[in-house]
Amino acid sequence: LIFASCAGFLAAFYFPTSLWALYALAAGGGLAFTRGCVSLHTQALCNGDVDLLGAVSRQCGMARTCSDVFGFVVPPVIYESVGWGGFAMFGASQPLLYCILAIPLHCRARAKEAAPDAMDKPEVASRWIDWALAGAFVSTELQWYLLNAAVPAALAHGYSFPASHIGVVFALGCLVSFAYLFALPYFPRVLKKHRPLNLLITYFGMTASWLLMAFCLAVPLPAPAFTVFVFLFLAMATASQVVLLECIMG
C-alpha cells in the first residue's frame, strides 16, 4: 500500500496534465493508510505490555496530529516554492522514508518470532466485537474526511475566510488535539474514565461538535465560536481513535 502511494505521486510527477494520473494520485493517497501499519509495528514493539501499548498508542495519536499540522502547512509552501513537480516528488519521498524507518522494527519483530524460547501463541478467532470496533474506527475516519470537506466550505462561504486562513485553522486544531492528548494523563482522576466510558464521552463530544457547528451556521454565530467547535471535534476524534486502536490491538 505504501508503494502504491509512491507510485501515485510518481505518476503525477511524470504526467502532470493527465487526468488518469490525478486519479492514480488520489487512489494511492487513499491506500496509504499508515495508521494500520504503525499500529501493527507498535503492537510488535510492545510485545504484550498493555501499559506500554497504551502509552505508545497515545504518542502515535500525538504524532498523527503533528503530521496533520505539517500536512496543512508544508505542502502548500513546497507547491508555491518549487511548483507541482517538487510537490509530487516530496510526496513520493514520504512513503519511501516510512519504509526505511519501518524496516528495523520489522526485523526486530521477526527476530523475536524466531527466538528459540518464544512460545507459540494459539490463534484466536475473530469475535464480533473486533468487527464492531473496526467499524467504529472507520466511522471516525469518515467523519474526519467529512470535516475536511465541509469545514473549509463553511469557512469560505459562510465566514469569507481566505484559503490560507483555512489551513491555519486546521493546523491550530491539530495543535489543540496534540495538547489534549499530551495533557490527558495529567487530568484529575474524575476526568480520566476507563473504557468504554471514555469512548462514549469522545463520541458524545464528536456528536455535540457537529450539532454546535450546524447551530453556528444557522443562527449565525461569529467565526471564533465555529472554530472552537471544530477544535473540539478534532480533539475528541483523535482521543477516540487512540482508545479504539488500543482495543483493536488488544
Image (cartoon, grey):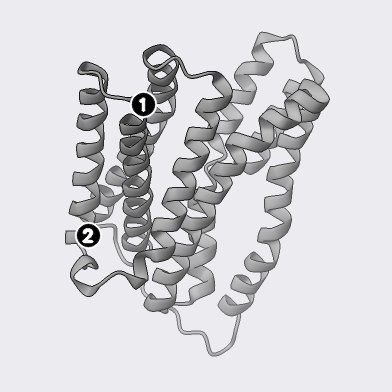
Foreground of the two, 230 or 67: 230
For disc 1, the neighbor class at 10 Å (few under 14, some 14 to 19, many from 20) is some
Tell me the SS state at disc 2. Answer: helix
Residue 13: which numbered mark, if any? Answer: none
Three-letter amino acid code at the position of disc 2: Asn
In three-dimensional space, the C-alpha distance between marks 2 and 1, rounded to whole angstroms, equals 29 Å
Determine whether 33 is above or below 86 in the image. below
Horizontal relation, residue 31 to residue 14: left or right: left
The residue lying at 22 percent from left, 59 percent from top is 198
Q: Position of residue 81 (x, y in %)?
A: 80, 27
Residue 138 in view (yes/no): no
Three-letter amino acid code at the position of disc 1: Ala
The image quarter in which residue 244 lies? bottom left
The residue lying at 76 percent from left, 41 percent from top is 93
Tell me the SS state at disc 1. Answer: helix
The residue lying at 52 percent from left, 69 percent from top is 44
The image quarter in which residue 197 lies? bottom left
For disc 2, the neighbor class at 10 Å (few under 14, some 14 to 19, many from 20) is some
Q: Position of residue 184 (x, y in %)?
A: 35, 65
Quadrant showing the N terminus = top right
The residue lying at 27 percent from left, 45 percent from top is 136
Horizontal relation, residue 159 to residue 102: left or right: left
Residue 236 in view (yes/no): yes
Q: Position of residue 62 (x, y in %)?
A: 49, 57
- Residue beneath label 1, please? 223
Horizontal relation, residue 99 to residue 151: left or right: right
The image quarter in which residue 215 lies? top left
Quadrant showing the C terminus = bottom left
- Residue beneath label 2, please? 198
